[in-house]
């Protein structure tokens, strides 16, 4: 514990020094602090499977990002980010976790990056998940929300509102020698229309395909629309598990979907979400299969429903609350009710030019 405390001041000094150093294009030092006090009935849905009351870290992070011009048409872009979990007693000796870290080149033909990157299949979700990052998020039902190291990503230039992209896993490094998953395509393709913040118009839509990455083959469709103070969206996904040796492998092939609705009332944002998946590949189903005490009568079908609110105090700080209910058919003891109250603070500093 003492070693970790001593490590924090030097780390902060290094980050601030880098952020303050003169450069052709100044980097941005940024971060987010997001914590929730969470109560869970059975511990099946929270980030950490804890029944009762726990302090949840909703992916608190710090990082550097920037872009450096390389002539008139080209640029170097980069991001170095780490998750911070030092508040957790169990993480006293491992206060940092890996998050997006990559470098890339941008030009007239698009953007190519290498490193640990959020892949294109994952990022097609946009903001359709009104509870993303919290204990009621969509990955409790569906897979496809992980990022991966040892990967490449390419995104085309925008053609009006249309953009395409691809992610590729360097399987020879990612998987050990002899792992049959090396033979999978380990490829994702995606196309988006509009943008998730509705800057180019009131509609966002996406389609994505995955083969091998995160041990599944799947197709995803996403749609969102903004109408006045309302935002409505939905995501549908067909999933087939590819994980070698997984229990019920042949039967874990199914369909999942969820819909979300949000309304902004001044500084308040009210939201609701409901979904269902029968592929047995989401987080709750995976936890059931990994539990030696679980008696699984059939591939789990997971249904989720959530209500929540946010109260903003400017662009950098908000309070938020969530209530969620998950029911699981096919295995006993995996239903869960979750209640959370949390806060989120975002910050960034740009070095002077």
Image (tube, rainbow, N blue to C red):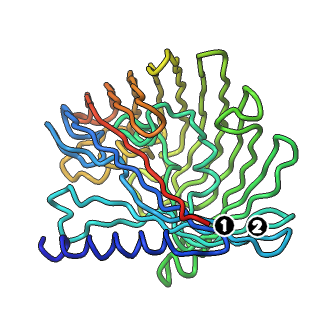
Q: Residue at x 25, y 49 (%)?
A: 48
Is disc 1 placed on a helix, strand or loop? Answer: strand
Judged left or right of residue 239, residue 274 is left
Please provide percent x and percent y for residue 2.
12, 74
Mark linked to residue 67: 1
Does 184 appear above or below 201? Answer: below
Seen from the viewer's position, the closer of residues 81 and 73 is: 73
Disc 1 versus disc 2: distance between alpha carbons? 9 Å
Quadrant where the N terminus lies? bottom left
Number of callouts: 2
Quadrant where the C terminus lies? bottom right
Q: Upstream in the sequence, badge 1 or badge 2?
A: 1
Judged left or right of residue 51, residue 63 is right
**Residue extending farthest bottom:** 177
Instruction: Determine whether label 1 and label 2 are within 8 Å by CB.
Output: yes
Mark linked to residue 208: none
Residues packed near mark 2 inside 10 Å, few (<14), some (14 to 19) or many (20 plus): many
- Which residue was labeled with disc 2? 106
Please provide percent x and percent y for residue 63.
46, 63
Is disc 2 placed on a helix, strand or loop? Answer: strand
> In this view of the protein, can residue 38 be seen by the observer?
yes
């Amino acid at each position: 514990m003492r070693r970790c405390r001593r490590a924090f001041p030097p780390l902060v000094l290094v980050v601030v020094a880098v952020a303050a150093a003169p450069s052709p294009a100044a980097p941005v030092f940024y971060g987010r602090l997001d914590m929730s006090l969470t109560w869970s009935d059975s511990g099946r849905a929270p980030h950490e499977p804890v029944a009762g009351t726990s302090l949840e870290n909703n992916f608190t992070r710090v990082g550097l990002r920037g872009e450096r011009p390389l002539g008139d048409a080209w640029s170097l872009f980069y991001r170095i980010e780490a998750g911070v979990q030092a508040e957790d007693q169990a993480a006293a000796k491992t206060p940092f976790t890996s998050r997006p870290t990559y470098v890339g080149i941008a030009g007239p033909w698009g953007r190519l990056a290498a490193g640990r990157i959020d892949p294109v299949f994952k990022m097609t979700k946009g903001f359709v998940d009104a509870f993303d990052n919290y204990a009621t998020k969509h990955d409790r039902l569906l897979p496809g929300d992980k990022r991966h190291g040892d990967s490449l990503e390419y995104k085309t230039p925008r053609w009006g509102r249309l953009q395409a992209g691809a992610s590729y896993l360097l399987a020879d490094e990612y998987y050990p020698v002899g792992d049959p998953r090396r033979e999978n395509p380990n490829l994702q393709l995606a196309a988006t229309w509009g943008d998730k913040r509705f800057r180019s118009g009131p509609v966002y839509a996406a389609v994505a395909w995955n083969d091998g990455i995160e041990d599944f083959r799947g197709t995803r469709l996403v749609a969102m629309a903004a109408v006045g103070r309302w935002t409505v969206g939905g995501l549908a996904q067909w999933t087939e598990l590819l994980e070698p040796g997984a229990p019920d492998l042949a039967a874990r092939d199914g369909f999942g979907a969820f819909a979300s609705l949000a309304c902004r009332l001044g500084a308040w944002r009210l939201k609701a979400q409901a979904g269902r998946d029968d592929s047995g590949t989401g987080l709750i189903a995976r936890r059931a299969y990994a539990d030696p005490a679980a008696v699984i009568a059939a591939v789990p079908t997971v249904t989720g429903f959530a209500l929540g609110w946010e109260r903003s105090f400017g662009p950098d700080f908000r309070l938020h609350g969530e209530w969620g209910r998950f029911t699981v058919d096919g295995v006993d003891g995996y239903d869960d009710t979750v209640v959370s109250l949390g806060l989120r603070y975002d910050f960034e500093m740009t070095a002077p030019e």
